[in-house]
Image (cartoon, helix red, strand yellow):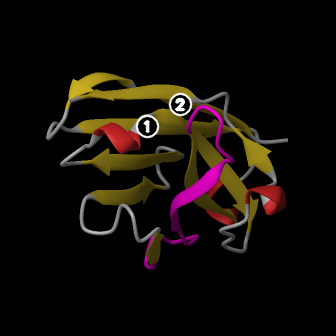
Amino acid sequence: QVQLVESGGGLVQAGGSLRLSCAASGRTFSHYAMGWFRQAPGKEREFVAAVTLSGGTRYYADSVKGRFTISRDNTKSTVYLQMNSLAPEDTAIYYCAAEYVRITRAAGEVDYWGQGTQVTVSS
């Protein structure tokens, strides 16, 4: 089992920034690719960003490319999502995700989920 705990969500004005953190425990963190997904009201959970085991390769949804940055610190078993130039359409619950070894953009293939953290962007 892998336990994931997100933090850092909140209310921010359009154009602002937030940094989400996700602390992992329970298994060897460096064996898991890590990602972030989000789910807005009435919509399906969607891929946001992912990072490989060592942090060397990162993937982003087109909607956040150039604004969001995913990173990980394997010494702290933590993954981060730096979100800049936030817009109202970024409002959602953001979920941390862990996948054993492989990267996935499909929510149905995620091995472990965090409980989610709310991000609200006001216009």
Q: In the displayed structure, does residue 38 sit left or right of residue 65?
A: right
Q: Quadrant of residue 114?
A: top right
What's under tag 2, amino acid-wise?
Answer: Glu
What's under tag 1, amino acid-wise?
Answer: Ser
Image quarter hosting the C terminus: top left
Considering the numbered disc 1 on the image, is that residue within a helix, a strand or a loop? strand
Residue drawn at (47%, 51%) of the image: 75
Q: Quadrant of residue 24?
A: top right
> Circle 2 is placed at which residue position?
6
Q: Main secondary structure of the magenta part?
A: loop
Residue drawn at (45%, 79%) of the image: 57
Tell me which segment is drawn in magenta: 40-57
Mark 2 to mark 1 CA distance (whole Å): 6 Å
- Horizontal and vertical percent for residue 16? 16, 36
- Give the class, few, some or many, for how many residues have Cα within 10 Å of label 2's Cα (few <14, many ≥20): many
Q: Quadrant of residue 90?
A: top left
Residue drawn at (25%, 43%) of the image: 86
Asked if labels 1 and 2 touch by Cβ distance under 8 angstroms, the answer is: yes
- Horizontal and vertical percent for residue 65? 33, 68
- Horizontal and vertical percent for residue 10? 35, 21
> Circle 1 is placed at which residue position?
21
Compared with 90, 101 (above or below) is below
